[in-house]
Image: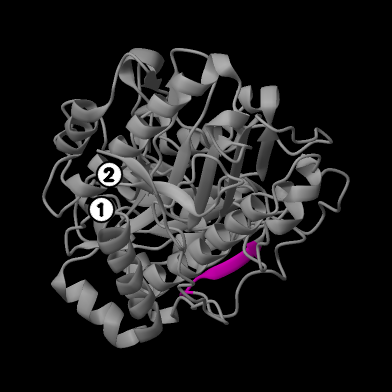
Amino acid sequence: MSSIAGVELPDFGSESNPPQILSATYRSRMAAAVERMARAGLDVLAVYADREHSATMAYLTGMDPRFEEALLLIGKGGNALLLVGNECEGYVPDEKPALTVELFQDFSLMGQPRGSSRPLRAILSDFGVGRDVRVGCVGWKCYDVALTGAPDRASDLPSYIVDVLRDLTGSAENVTNATDLFTNPANGLRVVGIEPEQIAAFEYASIQTSTSTLAAMRALREGVREDELERWLVTRGLPLSCHRMISFGRSSLRGLSSPSANRAALGDVYTIGFGVAGALTSRAGFIARGPADVSEGVRDHYARFAANYFDVVCAWYGALRLGVTGGEVFAAVERVRDDSLYRLAVNPGHTLHLDEWVHSPFAAGSTVPLNSGMALQMDIIPVSKGPFCYANAEDGVVLADASLRAALARDYPACWRRIQARRSFMDQTLGIPLDEAVLPLSNMPAYLPPYVMSPERVFVNR
């Protein structure tokens, strides 16, 4: 049962340089992709990326296209061809896996030169796309049979690419959606088996999002503008995984809204959300010193709402362990949630990678097991059934078995020490014991002051 207590948030430290993904890791990922496509009966993978949806391509190559589109073709023999536009031709990382890079200028912005590229049909044909060749398209999402009718053939790749693939292979049946190879919540390549250096990189990202969000919370005061507070959300060169979100008062009803000139008032709801590749941190509550600053019609409801929300957060963390199913975590949350106070906007959590939301194993009845090397987001969004109020304590963790924990401790000892300090804080100070496999990445793990102007008064589980 949650209560509010005086707590000093420790300084868990930071990392001066972002951990780098090794060339050998990219080669290993490419080999794993080739093995998966063979198991799926595919001859070619076509991995598409644009500015918004580039996580799978970045996972395989280290490149996220800027301004443009890109297409990575992978053959069943391990050969790979990366098609890029004018401005990305010089952006391809030097430390890339074994692949050939070719300029395809229709991936460039309109009005730029188009005279130095081969036609797409010729490129695909020369790569081996022909009659009866099985092509798997990897985009952003898989689709539901009830909504699309033919989810295996539904693709979010642009029609001008899919049309040529279908024509060359001779049938729409030969061109399928293969995004699941990377995003399936049970065994997707970007969901399970995250490497030690990727965990360290995610921890670095989470330090940035959490310390920035904490700085913004500490700078919150009456009269400050949303767009003034935004300056505390610092990326340190990491690409954003979503736009920065700061809102006060009625603006918070539009939870995804960007910062505006709106000014904070005492008794307002606030929301802050900040995400970069590999991490997102969000906090929400009241711009207040205590209950007396909250309007009388909301005060009592919010006290119950926020306390039960924190109970749910504790239940989520406490249910995590290797082998438990997403449905069991969902049930643990539902046993604690007070349905009279709020509903959940979406799933109680999801998997995390370079993109903020990959998939979610957390649903009623889900049999998807939680495995070592999963990055998970405690993303529980409560929607009040009474007067408008809000609470949020979103952060990320990684699940790791003994072997992965040992590798992380050996290769990234400072990261490991910070993780152990966070685990101790959650257990000893906040009263949230964690299974040994749960590695918190945020520098304010489960830290939630319901009244942000009293940052030392936070929820604890006792």
Mark sitting earlier along the chain (1/2): 2
Residue 45 screen position, x and y as percent: 40, 50
Query: Which amino acid type is shown beneath numbered disc 2?
Result: Cys
**Taking 141 as reference, is 189 left or right?**
left
Mark 1 falls on what kind of element? loop
Which residue in the protein does label 1 denote? 432
Specify whether residue 147 is in view. yes
Question: What secondary structure is found at the residue carrying circle 2?
Answer: helix
- The answer to which quarter of the image holds residue 405 is bottom left
Q: What residue type is labelled 1?
A: Ile
Q: Which residue is drawn at 40% across and 83% down?
A: 414
Which quadrant of the view contains residue 134? top left
The percent position of residue 268, horizontal first and vertical second, equals 66, 29
- Labels 1 & 2 near each other (Cβ < 8 A): yes
Q: Which residue is drawn at 77% across and 59% down?
A: 86
Residue 207 tag number: none
Horizontal arrangement in the rendering, residue 126 relative to residue 233 (left or right): left
**Total count of labels:** 2
Identify the residue under disc 2: 314
Of the pair 283 and 355, the residue shown nearer to us: 283
In the depicted structure, whether residue 169 falls above or below residue 123: above
Say if 159 sits above or below 103 in the image: above
Task: Tell me the crowding category of disc 1: few under 14, some 14 to 19, or many 20 or more residues within 10 angstroms, Cα based.
Answer: many
Residue that lies at the very extreme toward the right in this rendered image: 111
Residue ID at (35%, 20%): 150
Stretch in magenta? 97-102
